[in-house]
Image (cartoon, rainbow, N blue to C red):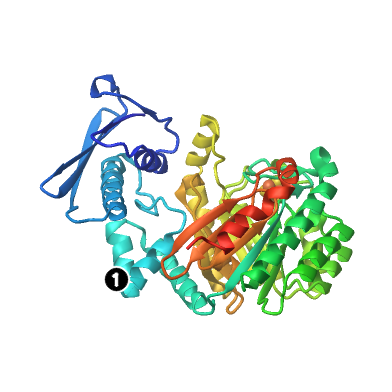
Amino acid sequence: MIYTLENHELKHAVEEMLFHLLPTETLSRADSVEQLTEPYCRSILTEENGEAAARAIVCMDGAVHEAEKRASVTGLATLDYKRTITELVKTTVYDAVVPFLPQAPVWGSLTGVRPAKLARGMIERGMTRGEAAVELREHFHVSPERTALTIRAAATAMEMDKTIGENDISLYVGIPFCPSRCYYCSFVSATTAQSGKLIEPYLDTLCREIEETAALVRAAGKQVQSVYIGGGTPTTLDEHQLARLLSALENHFDFSHLREYTVEAGRPDTITPEKLRVLKSAGVGRVSINPQSMNDAVLAAIGRKHGAADVLRAFEQARQAGFDEINMDLIAGLTGDTAETFAQTVDTLLNLSPENITVHTLAIKRGADLTDKAAAAAQRETVSQMLDGASHALQNAGYGPYYLYRQKFMAGGFENVGWCKPGTECFYNVSMMEELQTILSLGAGGVSKRVVRETGWIERANNPKYPLEYIQAADRLANGKKKLLFPKK
Ligand code: SF4
């Protein structure tokens, strides 16, 4: 699709909305209306007497639809002005494209990754939950089911927010190694076959970063509320390497205020009783065992080197090791999966009765080719059935949704939802996704965020993305965190 921006430069807003609604289109910008050929989208912005007016004209399949919206911009500060005109531009593009679609997207015109944060903002600014729900449905065209999900996740976040003190922070530690690469993976993760020799130097650097960060945290008077070790697959480390990492954390940080300690033991082919014992004796309380599917054909198709039986074994071993908080991740939309086989996967997990089940929707990798995008779009109905079926089964089994997030490139434009048994919400997941507190991220690819709780202001410091770059940057890793913990007044 070709598009024009007329009298504005909100390229990102227009492209984001077009991609959200028409994921199989390849977008290109034309400099003038004369260059347009069907299918096209014109986005026009005008401003007169303190009022901004956005108009979108979309031509596809021989038909044309137009939409127009206006808003007063008199006296708005720069940020509010930008927010207002961006929303006008996005919603007019939405209104002009939707008549061409077989059905409206379940998230309406919302393209952001944190819908519950948006709802929380509405409630904190004085709306009741009911009013926020009406706003989501009527202004953003969010479906009734997704609206209910969003309000519930917002309410959970607001409750958790009350338990966070001014000096409370959380830690994320990344281990970017996996035994093999899953075909859909969009994380930075190296296989042990390719990069196994980097694991020891990586751990050396990580232990140094742990020591330096802990000293900064102490000096800043902060206390650690939760720790999340993710990846990659942290249990790719052998039991000695795991023990070394966990001791470094325990020896350098003060964990006396810790309320939650999670380690992703994502791949069952990396889980052993010895590693589970190491985790348990270091005080880890929550592990995540992530089958993604319990169908062997699907597991083979996505490049996993294990079957469903290995997941059952790993789960049993984790229970035997004393873990009473276990999360299991699933993905809807994987190659070869059907609504029926996905429902069987959900049933198998419900029989295991883990405390948390996180239902993801397959994310289309950025830069995916047209065939992948078209395949994902064609699967929309199947993914919708998978998610609806999982939602009913989970609710019938006593699980409730407690956090959600969306990704930019998701099959069918759906979402990821964390479900839990009552009282087993993962604090870190909510805190991180809702940006409730400062989180320091250690390891390659880590993005630390300082959250100023009174204003919601967020500042970031990024670690180098890849393991080798990270190792080479060992001398500089503490600098970003120092800036976040000791901001200039
Ligand atoms: S286990 Fe996770 S991080 Fe590792 S390759 Fe698969 S999807 Fe990526």
Q: Residue at x 57, y 40 (%)?
A: 365
Q: Secondary structure at mark 1?
A: helix
In the foreground, 325 or 70: 70
Left or right of 157, for residue 465: right
The answer to whether 333 is drawn above or below residue 63 in the figure is: below
Q: Residue at x 67, y 55 (%)?
A: 478
Residue 258 at x, y = what percent?
A: 68, 76
Residue 235 at x, y = what percent?
A: 79, 57
Q: Count how many numbered circles sit on residues in the image.
A: 1
Q: What amino acid type should be assigned to the residue bearing mark 1? A: Glu
Q: Residue at x 74, y 41 (%)?
A: 468
Residue 198: name its quadrant. top right
Which residue is the extreme one toward the top?
Answer: 34
Left or right of 7, for residue 486: right
Residue 166 at x, y = what percent?
A: 53, 75
For mark 1, what is the residue? 131
In the foreground, 131 or 389: 131
Residue 133: name its quadrant. bottom left
Classify 10 Å Cα crowding around label 1: few (below 14), some (14-19), many (20 and above): some
